[in-house]
Image (spheres, helix red, strand yellow):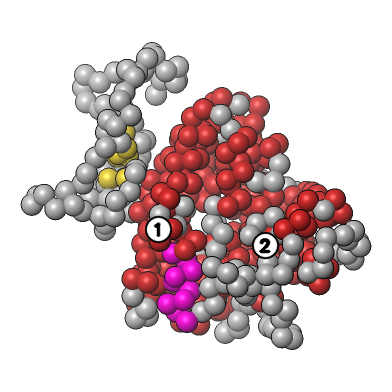
Amino acid sequence: MLDAVKRPPGVLGNPPEPAGDDLSDDDFQQALYLCYEVGYAGFAGVSTDWANEPSLVALRRRLSQRFLAGLTTGLDPLPEGRDIPARLEAMISADDSPSAADYLLHHGTQDQIRELLVHRSAYLLKEADPHTRVVAWLRGRPKAALVEILADEYGGGRVERMHAELYARSLRALGMDCRENAYLAELPGVTLATANLTSALCDRPCWRGALLGHLAVTEMTSSGANRRYGATLRRMGLGHPDVTDYFDEHVAADAVHDVVAAHDMAGSFARSEPDLAESVLRGAQLLLRVEGAFARHVIASWANGHSSLRARSSPAADTSRTDS
Amino acid sequence: MTEARRTDEATVVPYRDGPLIIRGAFRVLDQEGEPIGTPRATVALCRCGRSRARPFCDGSHRLTGFRASDRAEGPDSRECREDDGNSCR
């Protein structure tokens, strides 16, 4: 499929139907990722017109519906609680997934935290871009709250403070490739699934409630994780500000985003659109499910002394952006 | 109904079981009048006392089970606000 999108937009053939568990199917998640990626900054040499090519849009719709159908199978009953923020807190408390941030802080090696940064580069080099389209689908207080969060993600209009730029700076400072999609061929399905879920929930207005729940739990669990990543980097002697600024910024910014997302955004949305209140909670469940699968994969790999990345089977076609 | 506020007026909002959120025209200064922290449109100030980034919140209240109202506390505080339709505690 990557070869197809490097040609001018035209009718895509049908890819082979994926078999087995979509979450861990590397090829399925890569195909879905490519369907979304042409709609962001894109790849070097890939026409942005692909984003509206009908055969690609149809494929994206087919793959995303299958992806979400699989993710929404077997979800736990939703917790009770006084309001949406309280129910989101209950879901976080009940989540028994292991923490990659904890593992790295207590056991991690330099190679392993570098791998973690590779995994997260799929989304963080375009942090917040999926969410910007959701602003248009909201009104009133939840809209203002989402914009308040996004304003921080984009550095309040200062490019040097944009979170995606801070992440790229961390990669550069560690001698890693900061170009978008430079590591795409090494990313397993469970990693791409985390980015694909975000893209999927930002792709259609009917899923805006789920996206707000997804974002709220992301923000509610971010400060702690980023504090641990910052501590891990410092423990390893990698505490130069160019490396740690991204993580320090997230500890501070997400202390704000945590409560704004839970109360002003998700909570007020559920009050204003009660028919979608349940979907807010379902979105949070999906976030916890994909992040749990990701954490289990990386920790199991590291604990067994293996890389958590896919091996490069051949010199990858250059998919990375060359402009800054 | 809350009073209409000037767009530049600083506001301080305690969030339930969380920090104080400051918005508007504010500056955070140390005792010598020197600015603290990175300029940001909205900041979270620590309310639980356990942050390692005080005066700013770093999410530590989540680890300590900090509990506090989003309303005024004390023997004379109102438990319900009739004006915003939220359910009583």
Instruction: Give the quadrant of residue A243.
Output: bottom left
Question: Which disc is residue A42 wearing?
Answer: 2
- Residue A107 picture location, percent across and down: 45, 77
Determine which residue is flagged by label 1. A161
Q: Is residue A102 visible?
A: no
Residue drawn at the location 34% of the way across and 19% of the way down: B4
Quarter of the image that includes the N terminus of chain A: bottom right
Query: Which amino acid type is shown beneath numbered disc 1?
Result: Arg
- Residue B69 picture location, percent across and down: 32, 32
* Rendered position, A197 above or below A141: below
Q: Chain of mark 1?
A: A
Query: Which amino acid type is shown beneath numbered disc 2?
Result: Gly
Foreground of the two, A50 or B22:
A50
> Dominant secondary structure of the magenta stretch?
helix
Q: Taking A29 as reference, is B9 left or right?
A: left
Q: Which residues are magenta?
A: A166-175
Foreground of the two, B16 or A255:
A255
